[in-house]
């Protein structure tokens, strides 16, 4: 399980505080000042200056709180208290200066002063309240000139500060009245966004011997300041008691999206499930401020995926950093791959298709139609077709084709015997009228026993072919008037009636096409008789009427 411990925040909002005493710095009004290495906010960009100031006596001349830039119109940033007790910003030239009413500063009291430049408009605040505003469109600080000074203006004049200064802040944003008033009474903790120079001036011992404490620390960057001309002992020109300020708290609003197995510890509490939590770490920041941690925690589950994959031979599957070329079951962990940034576990059932690659030997009589490609071939040869199977893989079918010429003609001799022209193959003679095979007629020659149309089917073991029909009408039979009797129904299912025009005495027999007698009945002076021969196989049979005189009349019946 992953565990994260949270102790320090660098995001901020300043709310509730406890009171504590801080130092400040007293300037002698002659030549005391701090020279920093910070170049200031340049051009016409938005900016905010803040400081706490304390005047021991009514001013008789201008007193510079901070400044940077050059001594030309629009190029300096002199933030000061004038000899008339005004709070002023001086850049020089037309639309470069802004001054409050006279005597707004109360002598013998700490006062918070602030200047804001926002889109060419200037604002001056006293103790969190706006006291003047005006056009400062001429402000355009160059990138060269003096770096930020505290307690003295830039080169070209001298207006040293006489009194105490504490909590000097420079922002590269235009602070609102709400932001200024909400935070002026507390020391800032951390590094709020937009704060580019912050001198708390808490160094040294108030009123003590501070001869070695000559650096003013910039709390948000390395651009520190060097004290110049200070006595650094006693109650003037030295580190002294500053403005009593609250100790701010750092509020860190954290949104964390993590995965199952994660936990975060904030102070004494550990969280490992989705929720919104708030904790206060008393004195938890590096400055000793309280840290308020507002945590919006989302813990997402690990994603599990199962996939079944079928590949063609020669193909590969890549899952994460692994590539698979053989069938099998695999488990892969894809770190941070899910939509929530959590690990994904992928189970893969990988298989490969078996390529269909078959060769068939096929025969065609005179020609061959291959339904795979819709082609008709008239000669022997080898033919191959490649196609995609249901998985999109290539498959191959090859035919070894033998086209067998099988012409089929039939001749008839003078005796009425039919003969197929092909020898040494299989034969089956067919009655063309009924399309039924003639039992036993399986030789090359066939002698019909009755008149009709006949054909032969040849079979060489690979293919078959059927001849045309030949009609036979010269089968010699002693006949009598065939109209003297009738057979019905014909065709029949084996149950039929033989009916005479007049009373008949004699024999009636049933024979198959080979002349074999199947059934016989004798009639005596009867006009009809019924037959029930349903057990007979389907085929052609003959009803033979034999008169006492020996004359035979025959009619064909079809049993279906």
Image: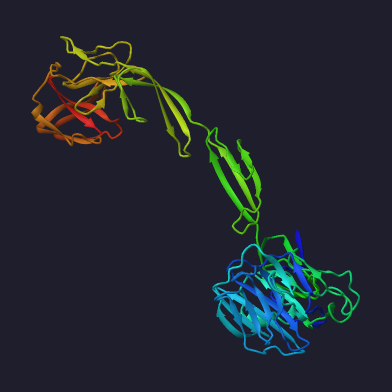
Q: Position of residue 397 (x, y in %)?
A: 43, 27
At x 80% / y 81%, what residue is drawn? 242
Q: Is residue 248 visible?
A: no
The front one of 2 and 329 is: 2
At x 22% / y 24%, what residue is drawn? 431
Q: Indicate left or right for 537 with 135 as reference.
A: left
The front one of 15 and 348 is: 15
Q: Position of residue 163 (x, y in %)?
A: 78, 82
Instruction: Indicate whether 452 appears above or below 81.
Output: above
Instruction: Indicate whether 400 appears above or below 140.
Output: above
Q: Residue furthest front?
A: 156
Q: Indicate left or right for 369 with 555 as reference.
A: right
Question: Which color scheme did the rendering employ for the protein?
Answer: rainbow
**Marker count (numbered):** 0
Quadrant in which residue 80 is drawn: bottom right
Quadrant in which residue 51 is drawn: bottom right
Q: Is residue 85 visible?
A: yes
Q: Indicate left or right for 499 with 162 as reference.
A: left
The front one of 39 and 177 is: 39
Instruction: Indicate whether 380 appears above or below 27.
Output: above
Quadrant in which residue 84 is drawn: bottom right
Q: Residue furthest right?
A: 209
Q: Position of residue 347 (x, y in %)?
A: 62, 48
Q: Position of residue 170 (x, y in %)?
A: 68, 72
Q: Indicate left or right for 501 with 93 as reference.
A: left
Quarter of the image that includes the C terminus: top left
Quarter of the image that includes the N terminus: bottom right
The front one of 119 and 141 is: 141
């Amino acid at each position: 399980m992953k565990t994260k411990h949270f102790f320090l925040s660098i995001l901020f909002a300043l709310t509730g505080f406890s009171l504590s005493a801080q130092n400040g710095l007293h300037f002698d009004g002659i030549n005391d000042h701090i020279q920093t290495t910070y170049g200031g906010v340049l051009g016409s960009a938005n900016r905010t200056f803040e400081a706490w100031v304390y005047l021991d006596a009514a001013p008789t001349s201008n007193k510079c709180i901070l400044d940077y830039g050059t001594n030309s119109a629009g190029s300096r940033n002199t933030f000061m208290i004038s000899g008339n007790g005004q709070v002023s910003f001086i850049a020089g030239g037309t639309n470069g200066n802004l001054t409050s009413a006279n005597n707004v500063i109360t002598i013998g009291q700490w006062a918070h002063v602030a200047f804001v430049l926002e889109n060419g408009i200037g604002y001056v605040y006293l103790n969190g309240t706006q006291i003047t505003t005006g056009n400062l469109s001429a402000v355009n600080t160059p990138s060269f000139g003096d770096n930020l000074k505290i307690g003295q203006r830039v080169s070209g004049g001298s207006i040293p500060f006489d009194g105490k200064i504490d909590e000097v802040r420079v922002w590269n944003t235009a602070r609102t009245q709400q932001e200024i008033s909400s935070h002026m009474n507390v020391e800032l903790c951390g590094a709020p966004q937009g704060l580019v120079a912050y001198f708390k001036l808490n160094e040294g011992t108030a009123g003590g011997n501070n001869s070695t404490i000559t650096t003013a620390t910039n709390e948000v960057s390395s651009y520190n300041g060097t004290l110049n001309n200070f006595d650094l002992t006693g109650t003037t020109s030295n580190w002294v008691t500053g403005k009593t300020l609250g100790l701010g708290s750092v509020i860190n609003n954290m949104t964390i999206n993590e995965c199952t197995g994660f936990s975060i510890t904030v102070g004494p509490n550990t969280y490992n499930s989705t929720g919104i939590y708030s904790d206060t770490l008393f004195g938890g920041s590096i400055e000793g401020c309280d840290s308020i941690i507002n945590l919006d925690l989302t813990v997402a589950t690990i994603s599990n995926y199962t996939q079944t994959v079928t590949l063609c031979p020669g193909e590969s599957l890549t899952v994460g950093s692994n590539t698979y070329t053989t069938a099998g079951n695999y488990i892969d962990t894809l770190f941070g791959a899910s939509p929530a940034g959590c690990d994904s576990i992928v189970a893969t059932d990988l298989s490969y298709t078996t390529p269909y690659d078959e060769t068939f030997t096929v025969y065609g009589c005179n020609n061959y139609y291959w339904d795979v490609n819709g082609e008709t071939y008239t000669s022997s040869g080898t033919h191959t077709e490649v196609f995609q199977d249901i998985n999109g893989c290539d498959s191959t079918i090859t035919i070894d084709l033998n086209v067998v010429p099988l012409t089929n003609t039939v001749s008839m001799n003078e005796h009425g015997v039919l003969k197929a022209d092909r020898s040494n193959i299989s034969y089956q003679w067919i009655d063309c009228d009924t399309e039924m095979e003639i039992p036993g007629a399986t030789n090359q020659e066939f002698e019909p026993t009755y008149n009709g149309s006949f054909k032969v089917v040849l079979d060489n073991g690979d293919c078959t072919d059927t001849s045309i029909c030949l009609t036979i009408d010269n089968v010699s039979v002693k006949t009598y008037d065939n109209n003297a009797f009738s057979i019905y129904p014909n065709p029949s299912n084996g149950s039929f009636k033989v009916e005479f025009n007049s009373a008949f005495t004699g024999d009636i027999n049933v024979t198959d096409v080979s002349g074999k007698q199947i059934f016989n009945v004798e009639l005596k002076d009867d006009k009809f008789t019924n037959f029930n021969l349903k057990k007979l196989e389907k085929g052609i049979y003959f009803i033979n009427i034999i008169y006492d005189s020996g004359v035979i009349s025959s009619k064909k019946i079809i049993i279906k």
